[in-house]
Amino acid sequence: MERPSFLDQEPPPGYIAGVGRGAVGFSTRGSKFQQNNNENNGRIPKRFQKSNQFSGTDSHSKSIEELQDDKDAEDIFSAIDKRLQNKNKKLKRYKQENGLKYDKMADQFSDLKRGLMKITEDEWLNLPESGDITKVNKRQRLEEQLNRKMYAAPDSLLTEMTGGKTSNVSNVNLTKLTEEREKLLGKQLDLNFQEEEGQKSEMTNQYLNELNTLQLQMQNKYDNVEEDDVAKTRLILKSYRTSDPYKSEGWISSSRLEEKTGNLELARQLIIQGCEYCARDGDIWLENIRLHSNDIAKCKQIVTQGIRYNLKNVKLWIKAMELEKLCLNQKRILRKAIIKLPHEEKLWKLMIEKEDSPGELEMIMKKSVEMVPQSLGLWISFIRSLNNFKESINWLNVARKKLPKEPFLWIVELQMEEKFNKDVTIYKLTEILQNGFNCLIENGVEWDYRYWIKQAEILKESKEYDKSVEGIVSSVVCYKPLDHSELIKYFDELGNTNIQIIGYGNILLMEPTKFQLWQKLKQVCLKLNQLELMFEIYDKIIYQEGKINESLIKTQSIIGLMYCKELIKLGKNLKASQTINEMATICPDDLQVWLAKIKTDLLNGNHDMVKETFNQLIKKFPHEARVHYKYIKFLIFKTQLDQAKIHLKEYCLMKFPGNFIFYLQLSQIYELEKDYTSSHEVLKKGNDTVKDHYSIICINYAKVNEIFLHRISIARSILDRGILKTEGQEQELIQWNKIQMEQRNGNQEQYEFLIFENLKRFPHSSLIWRERILQTLNNMNSVKRLKTSEKRMIFQDALRATNNSSLILQTIGESFFINQPQNNVNNTLPLSQNDDLSTINKAVKWFERALKSDPRNGDAWIWYTRCLLQMQATPETIKAKCLSQVAEHEPNKGTLWLQTAKDIQNPYRTPSQVLSEICRM
């Protein structure tokens, strides 16, 4: 900004600064007393004596006269004020003497003030504004004049429209005429525009479209801004700029306002003017560059000028670099910037990004960490760029001295170890990081396991440093101050990730008896389809240096049994058998290990080995009922019924007279031989002897009389006596079997009566509610088709009463899968022959809900598989959704399922084989 020329000139003669605006000079604290003395003495200050040096004594006499006039005026005004104060004294004195009330002017309006309370809000808001109301009419006249439009038309047109009669000109609709003319002109302009548009190039069209899009965006963004608001804002910003022109905020805001309103040229002018006032502010130069972004040459001039005033502004240097297209020019600008700002981290990072030469890059990185030693990013980039392990570790130690509280440098060391040594062990990485933990704590850094696990997750995403990830998680788990329960909760919140598997595995290596954690580990491995990782953890715990861990097996043999069970599910029976044999050698007195050995031998078909094992176990564990039960089960499977009966009669029933299972096994053997009378006698004896699990003996005793001996009344009386002897769940089970017996024998009235009676006794029983649903569906289908609303009501009542029981959910799914309910021996609903896929899909959803509620419900798996077969699902789908899931969950509930799974003639089938047999796959 140029200096005004008048500041360097001499003032004219007689010039007094500020006299034109009433200034009389400057005063001090002591000048007040001097002024009073001057007034009393009639003296004039020296600075005014020069201008009156030719006036002589006349000026002094004039000043005395003026002072006398001022004093007379003051006396007059003080007399007036005194008269006004005494104006109403006579009236007040008169009313007080005559006993009249004297009211002040304010008291005369008190009643009106109280009346203001009755005014409504609308009346108050509708009060007219104070001011000259005559201006309203004037404003209305001006608005009417502005709304008037003048139309020019030839007389011939008016004559034609009035039919040659000039007297009726008022019938001409000039507004309509003008609208038609505007439409005609618009069409003509559109045609001309289309002709010109067809001659333009594609680049021009694209440029115009971009401008139109930008304009529409700006218009849509600011279309709600009224003109009055813009004018007010513009006025405010103008006053702000005028009051303080050396602040860049006012200039930037004003230019942006003009830009938003479409005055781009004015915006540029304002920002240029602002750059003159605020040359030392980098933001205003950046705004100037933005407004001139369509002219690169102009932008370069602006940024050069801005840098001249702001050498320390990093943003301007970066903007100057961005304006250059050639990489060479960009590096040249960055070098200049680094010379001016050698300690700026951003400039060094940009220089590293732009450099292509490896030699130059290494020199730049070394220089950068020397100039900016507190920059973690520069240190990491430099260390990772080194190709020598020792050199990288040396520089890493230097970095740790500069940044002793930075934990990420220890992670970089793990990366360097894994990068240059592919055979590095997890143990070594764990040692390095735990040493880092101790160093950080010594330097006052608070240790937080969340930070380290978060860094492990980030490192895992790169898929380059798997050992480092495992080393980090292992170090966190093994660190002494940490509580594993808190860490397990944190791992649970991570979701299904590899970090979870590594974390759970490391915790189990330290505490292998956390059986719930084994289940969590298995679930995560299944979801990620990485079961091999779970077996790796098992191998690390069970085997050490290729040999089985005897100390662990002796104290925690259940871990080895879990391992063998998972191997069997995966189909690795031979490896499971090998492990079990080793465990049996280590733990010869562990019954669980011997029973697992028998199971694996049966799966492998080693029946002779199984018999030898049983002979050993009977001698070693003669008082264990389980051994004898499984031995009888094996003899029945091998069809050695006579030997089984002898062992039951001569040993088991004599040794264990109160155990119900041996009575059942003996009765089943007689049923296989079709000797139902002997079966009846055995169960009768059991019914009189057994106390535990009495309901099972009672139900089987009644079924033999009903089904095989056809003594229905005796069967009914057996169940009635059983009901009297039992209570709770056992009584509920007997009542349910009695309901089924009445249905099988066609006693419909008694069947329905028992259902309603037992719903009163057991309102939350899923077995009774299932019978209620089946009974209602059968009755409605026999008379008329069940309405959807009635069906829904029954389902809702059952679900509410049983708390969404898996059995009820399964029963509802069956109702969508049936065609006509039929009564049969098993009281199950028949397969549907209907090809309505929508109904099948509904059934599938209900069965999925049932399985989610209880995955060990075998009947739900059967119906779900039937639905998929009805929908013609592929074998791969059946295997993935049914067979593999059944093998995993091992169902043990359901009438249909148990009839096949507990078949005494073939009891050693896997769950997948049971499901395939029932569904005939």
Image (cartoon, rainbow, N blue to C red):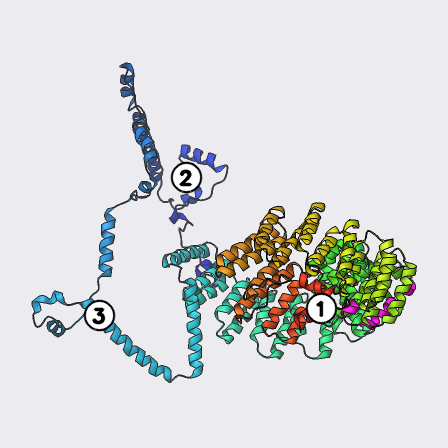
**Dot 3 corresponds to which residue?**
178
Of circles 3 and 2, which is in front? 3
Of circles 1 and 3, which is in front? 1
The residues tagged by marks 1 and 3 sit, at their Cα atoms, a distance apart of: 91 Å
For the residue pair 905 and 92, the one nearer the viewer reads as: 905
For the residue pair 906 and 460, the one nearer the viewer reads as: 906
Residue that appears at 43% across and 33% down: 36
**Dot 1 corresponds to which residue?**
914
Image coordinates of residue 475 in percent, x first then y, are 80, 61
First in sequence: mark 1 or mark 3?
Answer: 3
- Image side of residue 891 versus residue 607, left or right: left
Image coordinates of residue 580 in percent, x first then y, are 86, 66
Image coordinates of residue 920 in percent, x first then y, are 66, 73
Packing grade of label 2 (10 A; few <14, some 14-19, many >=20) is some
Q: Examine the image and state in which quarter residue 472 appears.
A: bottom right
The magenta stretch is 566-586
Q: Which amino acid is tagged 2?
A: Ile
Packing grade of label 1 (10 A; few <14, some 14-19, many >=20) is many
Q: Is residue 212 visible?
A: yes
**Dot 2 corresponds to which residue?**
44
Quadrant for the C terminus in the image: bottom right
Q: Which amino acid is tagged 1?
A: Val
Residue 551 against residue 753 in the figure, above or below = below
Q: Examine the image and state in which quarter residue 328 appears.
A: bottom right
